[in-house]
Image (cartoon, rainbow, N blue to C red):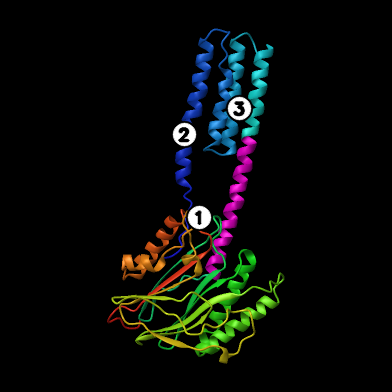
Amino acid sequence: MRVRHRRHRSGRPWRLSHGLIALPLALIAAVTVLDLTSPTTIHLGPFLVAAPALTASFAGPALTGAIGALAVAAQILIGFLHGGIATSNHQAQIAALVIISVLVTVFRYVRDRHQRQLSRVRTVAVAAQQVLLWPLPRRSGALRIESAYISAEAEAEIGGDLYAAVPVPGGTRLVIGDVRGKGLTAIGEAAALVGAFRGTAYQHLALPAAVAHLGNAVHWNMAHAPEEDPESFVTALVLDVYDDGPCVELVNCGHPPPLVLGSGGIRSLEVAEPAVPLGLTAPAEADYKVESFAFGPGEVLLLYTDGVIETRDRSGAFYPLTERLAEWNEPDPAALIRRLHHDLLRYADGNLGDDVAMVAITRPPGAGPR
């Protein structure tokens, strides 16, 4: 599953505005006719202010201003035919309509300008996401991979969670991590780790050496960051999944253990001694121990950040990940990620407390490298 962004279609809003413009025009015509056919003691002209206000809800400042000018013209016509525009009552109505029409038009202009700025910011955020979080390949050798990223911030596209994958001889190396903290600092630290991870792809380092390189890169970046946080760190899981091997090898640096879903149920790949999170020290290769776990054809390996298991419902209960997975018994990675994505949002009532990253991997029975 990929993070999708809604595309703006320029034709549909214009067609919508083109049809809705009949409403304020009909309102102006109706108020004008009713006022002219009513006794002079009844004044319906003030209702004309609804025309520019209504237009501003679906059209831009130019059309809003034009409808406002038309409403003022209708008010002048009413005044001219009902006692003359020189009367204080009609002058007050015309002046009030002019002021309100101008204010509504200016408001619409400011709102459109803000939306354009927000659109540019979102465009930059999407570009940043594509640089930081390259879409994981759906196929890597014999493996099938699906992923999803959900930002806890309503207007954000990226946060402190990360994932990446690179090819290694005979398989695929993946990393999934979670930067402590939020905001631009967390994004910068996530970018540093992902960049260091991709930079090791051509070196074909052994798994402990690769993790040590990541740890030193994150430690150096945090030490030289403009706003250094002495308590910053990154929990990470780095693993090798082989095309034809019956196991997965991993190093866990304080990250939630992955889960394997198979016909025999759900297994948690918990290491005996997790390494310390990245960034706390300048590590050496000897600081990391590789552990192997069974991972056979047809099974699904699920990687996730702690935003999944720390999601709460209205009562404060944590998301029951293992129970949900056992209930679904979903063997397809794409369907599993899609289902987990929607269920998390539903469970949290659409308000996640933390970013969420998820990756599902499988090696179909009989599949060969591509």
Disc 1 target residue: 351
Q: Residues within 10 Å of mark 2 (few under 14, many from 20)?
A: some
Work out how far the residue at label 2 is from the one at label 1, CA to CA, in angstroms.
Answer: 34 Å
Q: Mark 1 vs mark 3: which is more N-terminal? A: 3
Q: Mark 2 vs mark 1: which is more N-terminal? A: 2
Q: Residues within 10 Å of mark 1 (few under 14, many from 20)?
A: some
Element on which disc 2 rests: helix
- The C terminus lies in which quarter of the figure? bottom left
Disc 3 target residue: 69
Q: Residues within 10 Å of mark 3 (few under 14, many from 20)?
A: some
Foreground: disc 1 or disc 3: 1
Tell me whether the residue at label 2 lies in contact with that at label 1, contact meaning CB atoms closer than 8 angstroms.
no
Which residues are the magenta region? 105-132
Pinpoint residue 347: horizontal percent, then vertical percent.
43, 57
Is the stretch drawn in magenta largely helix, strand or loop?
Answer: helix
> Is residue 326 placed above or below 290 in the rendered structure?
above
> Which one is nearer the viewer's eye here, 248 or 319?
319
Q: Mark 3 vs mark 2: which is more N-terminal? A: 2
